[in-house]
Image (tube, rainbow, N blue to C red):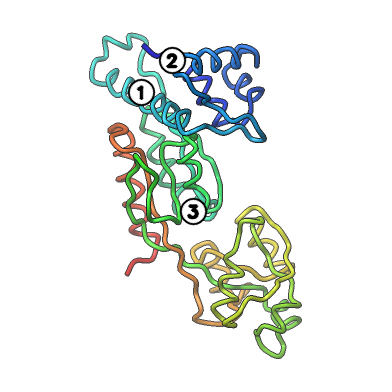
Amino acid sequence: MLDYAALSALAAVVREGSFERAAQALFVTPSAVSQRIRSLEERVGSALVVRGQPCRATDTGRRLCQHVDRVRLLEQELQSALPALAPEGLTRVALPIAVNADSLATWFAPAVAAYAANAPVLVELMVDDQDHTAEWLRSGAVLAAVTGTARPPAGFNSRPLGSMRYVAAASPSYVERHFVDGVGAGSLALAPSLVFNTKDDLQARWVRRLCHRDVELPRHAVPSPHAFVVAALAGMGWGLHPQELIASQLREGSLVELVPETPLDVPLYWQHARAASTLVDQLSRQLLAAAALALQHP
């Protein structure tokens, strides 16, 4: 039999990124976490964690992390079917999910909140760029993710959600100040832009498509979708916004498109561990239904 206390320690280290934070999450000492993982490594005969900043799972460690998350879900499902196994009531089980910030700020949050309000789970959301959330799956830190990658990691299923539509927008005063002679490579090279973080390449992709070449953009980093909108309204810069998030500002004219009718559509996919549990299946159905209403479809 596997040592599930050790497996829980491994999963905590991978999810939290360090032995110290894992110990805090488990209410034990870092030494106890280290001892549990060392014992597990001796048992399986290979390293399970690459120590670093952050710590990450080896291939074997990733498989064990995914295993313990699935076991927790299956145990909870069994308790639902056999209440005698849980005389004190169902235990809520952790459900780690990676999602991009723009989805979280628009269609995803209401859907996952409605699901979690009635399901015996404790949702743990990890936020990253849609082109990087798949790495959370590969690392073993999450069981499911909204990602921009169509092909799933081994052991996962992938289903298309639709495309999130982005529009390049800024305040009218900003446009008058920086694009009086039009929007082109020259003006874009001088006008401050907004990016979410260093992983955010949406602005560069839009500019490349518009100008047919790369342009070095001056950038403000604003790592929050709602703060992104506030910054644009204040004239701090221009940026690619989810159309749904700024629909009212576009209607009232407090934000305007830099070049009308030039949206950027970013395909999104829902990827989750195969045969995880009915809880994951229920979440998948709820998210697919929400995405069908909120995202763009061919």
**Which dot, 3 or 2, sits closer to the camera?**
2
Q: Which mark is residue 4?
A: 2
The picture places residue 148, in percent across and down from the top left corner, at 45, 56
Q: Residue at x 52, y 32 (%)?
A: 57
Disc nearer the start of the sequence (3/1)? 1
Quarter location, residue 115: top left
Distance between mark 3 and mark 2 Cα atoms = 34 Å
The picture places residue 91, in percent across and down from the top left corner, at 39, 19
Q: Is residue 282 left or right of residue 266?
A: left
Distance between mark 3 and mark 1 Cα atoms = 28 Å
Answer whether labels 2 and 1 touch (C-beta < 8 Å): yes
Q: What type is the residue that disc 2 sits on?
A: Tyr
Dot 3 lies on which element?
helix
Q: What type is the residue that disc 1 sits on?
A: Val
> Going by the picture, which residue comes out furthest to the front?
45
What residue did someone put label 1 on? 71
What residue did someone put label 3 on? 103
